[in-house]
Amino acid sequence: MREHGRFQDEPKRARTRRGTPGVDEPIAPTAAVFDAAERAQDPGRGGGPAVSRAIDGLHMSAGNAAVAGLFEGTTTHRHREGRAQVRAGRTGTTDRPVVQASTAGEAAPADEMSDESDSTLTALAAGPPKTGPSWTHVGPPSNTTYTVTGSLRDAANTVGSRTEAGSVATAPSPDTETWTPEGGAAQVIAARVTVNQVEELPTWADESQATANQQAEWNRFHAAITTHEAGHVAIDKTSYAGAHKNMVGKSPDAADKALDTVEAKATTDNDTYDTKTSHGLTQGTGINPNIDEVTKVP
């Protein structure tokens, strides 16, 4: 079973650049920059030199990206958090008691330019601003446990009563940068996808009180369920590999749908794995609680 979550875009506020070491200076509003330029201009001589000086001042205080934005467009950040998709298993009983286990940047600043000519502005306006790298990171999973107590039979019954004997919860979380050229549509220029995984396995609190054979049976089961969960972790790593490549260059909505497609494939791949392994049973995830039990005869 996997739950599909809703995501909410959270555009980030404009950042500030450091004009001098140790001092953060806010980016001056565009209108204020040009108003200052007009006031400083001598009558009858046009706005060229003054505007140029104003842009130079904006460039010094806010960086290349801010100047490029005046001519090319705007950049924004988008982030969404995915709700964990838990692969839950079922339990079953055969001719012996069995527990079936299963699973469920900131743009890099350009080199400082001393050229004050219009060629500088042309270079800045040639395309979208520089961004950080794009990537997809899957796991490794963080490990959690739940505790069962009592005899081996008690432990087996407790594990069997749970919705899942073991699980891997997966939640993709993309962070994208978008760029909107002047008069154009927004497109994703950088995508960083983090696929968080949380693995949960059982521990037996009273294992030390059990017989050696019962401990061996529990350890065999625990190794088997660990192997099954590791299979889900590996499938996610393969299924989500390169997810960011399907997002860059597309509109924000199309990029979201591209990630949804990757997520759907990961679900299908994991479901297929559970079907082939009978949710771990063919890998030895059943528990035999009859070991070393004494049956009283009337």
Image (cartoon, helix red, strand yellow):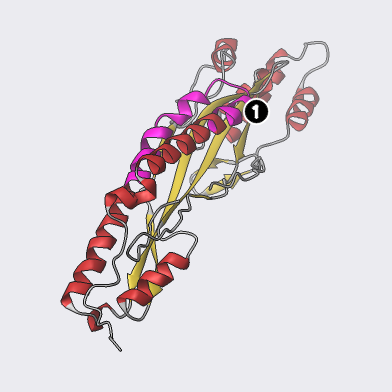
Horizontal and vertical percent for residue 293?
25, 79
Q: Secondary structure at mark 1?
A: helix
Quadrant that contains the C terminus: bottom left
Q: Is residue 67 visible?
A: no
**Quick check: is 291 in the magenta stretch?**
no
The quadrant holding residue 200 is bottom left
In the depicted view, which residue is nearer to us: 245 or 238? Answer: 238
In front of the other: 203 or 254: 203
Label 1 amino acid? Asp
Above or below, comparing residue 157 to residue 167 in the picture:
below
Q: What's the magenta bit mostly, secondary-structure-wise? A: helix
Rendering coords of residue 29 (x, y %): 73, 34
Q: Quadrant of residue 284?
A: bottom left
Q: Is residue 102 above or below residue 152?
A: above
Q: Give the magenta range.
A: 231-259
- Left/right placement of residue 190 relative to residue 281 reads right
Question: Which residue is painted at 49% across and 31% down in the image?
Answer: 262
Residue 295 position, x and y percent, is: 27, 82
Question: Where does label 1 land, which residue?
Answer: 253
Q: Residue furthest right?
A: 43
User: Does the magenta run of residues contain 247?
Assistant: yes
Q: Is residue 211 left or right of residue 144?
A: left
